[in-house]
Image (cartoon, helix red, strand yellow):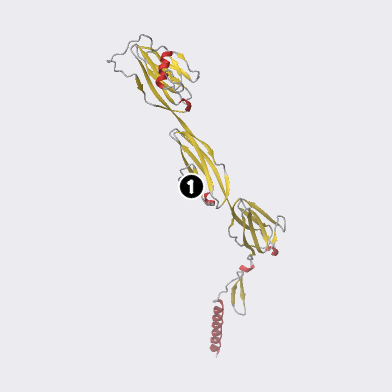
Amino acid sequence: MGVCGYFVVSWKCLVVLSLRLLFLVPAGLPVRSQGDSQSDNKVMENITIRQGETVLLRCSQGIAVTHTAWLNRSSILYAGEDKWSVDPRVSLAVLNEEEFTIKIENVDTTDEGQYICAVQTRSQPRTTSVHVIVQVPPKIMNLSKDIAVNEGSNVTLMCIANGKPEPTVTWKLLSSTGLVSEDEYLEIPSISRQQAGTYECTAVNDVSADVQTVELTVNYPPFVTEGRDVGVSLSQRGVLQCEADAVPEAEFEWYRDDKRLFNGMDTIEIEADGKVSMLTFFNVSELDYGNYTCVAINKLGTMNTSMVLYEVIEPTSSTLLQAFSPTTDKTVFSEGPGAVQDGNSGTMGTQASTCLLIIIGLQLLLKF
């Protein structure tokens, strides 16, 4: 079968073949004595490096070194100053009596594995091995797209990330505090409108982090705030207002009894600004007073509220003047509807009349 078999080439076999090819073990090399205690093989500490960076592979030499080479898992990279690798990222960094160093730029995951420095001295060959570990920053590979669902639906958001070491994935709703989930899949059963918003997925490992977001929209039917009645004087400007919370935003319709109102009818104007619709009367007449209904509509439902436009009578200057009644000697203060009379005014008038009669009677008695 040959020295190394037909299909499987071990590290030891590769080193032996490389040394033979490089003539690092010349014929007639003296056999080591039992006093040579130096080990043939040494293992350096692992080298951990991030993807895209440059790694330096160092090997100590010595004055007795005659030949040296760097090998990776399947081929020779450098033999002394001679480059055997066709990879342009591999180059010679240092070669002198003390050190033999090569560098690999823009390291990728394919560069991960064991590397061997084979050295031939005058007395014996030796090898030094090192294992290169390539760390990869996390990258979110598969993320749920922005979605819109109806309130009450079951929702699943997905965030799949790769990296080395394997990244940890967490979910967070930006409008709230704290984590929502610590898993690649975020399950939200029977979602409510309060759970709508921007969800942030974070994949993190020892290298760095990758962050992406998903916009989750929750649709729900309109909820209309109770309408408020408005009082307006004749010929004045009046406004009825209607507010509705809904997703998608509600469209508004206004009705007077069963008749729908439109812009331009009877000096009115209807306008909407997001969640609010306003019905404006520019010159209120007697015919405008009455009951009005606002209806909010979206694809999930409708809701309405009613309100009243009623008349307010403005006070005039005459209603603020005092009036005197000679028949009752009562002073009346008119303050419009609901005015209250001074109950003491009648008593004061009676007392004055009695006093006057007593004075007249005394004068008559004095004459006689």
Q: Quadrant where the N terminus lies?
A: top left
Q: Secondary structure at mark 1?
A: loop
Image check: 104 left or right of 220? left
**In the image, farthest residue toward the right:** 265
In this orientation, which residue lies closer to the viewer: 249 or 80?
A: 80
Image check: 278 left or right of 47? right
Q: Is residue 108 in view?
A: no
**In the image, farthest residue toward the top:** 28
**In the image, farthest residue toward the left:** 35
The residue depicted at 59 percent of the width and 74 percent of the height is: 331
In this orientation, which residue lies closer to the viewer: 196 or 56?
A: 56
Q: Residues within 10 Å of mark 1 (few under 14, many from 20)?
A: few
Task: Report the amino acid beneath label 1.
Answer: Ser
Q: Quadrant where the C terminus lies?
A: bottom right
List x then y, in percent, for residue 287: 70, 64
**In the image, farthest residue toward the bottom:** 368
The residue depicted at 47 percent of the width and 19 percent of the height is: 90
Q: Which residue is mark 1?
A: 176
Image check: 32 left or right of 240? left
Q: Is residue 146 above or below residue 238?
A: above
Image check: 119 left or right of 157? left
List x then y, in percent, for residue 116: 40, 20
Q: Is residue 365 in view?
A: yes
Task: Locate residue 93: give its quadrant.
Answer: top left
List x then y, in percent, for residue 262: 70, 56
List x then y, in percent, for residue 108: 48, 26
Q: Is residue 232 above or below residue 165?
A: below
In this orientation, which residue lies closer to the viewer: 16 or 320?
A: 16
In this orientation, which residue lies closer to the viewer: 118 or 12?
A: 12
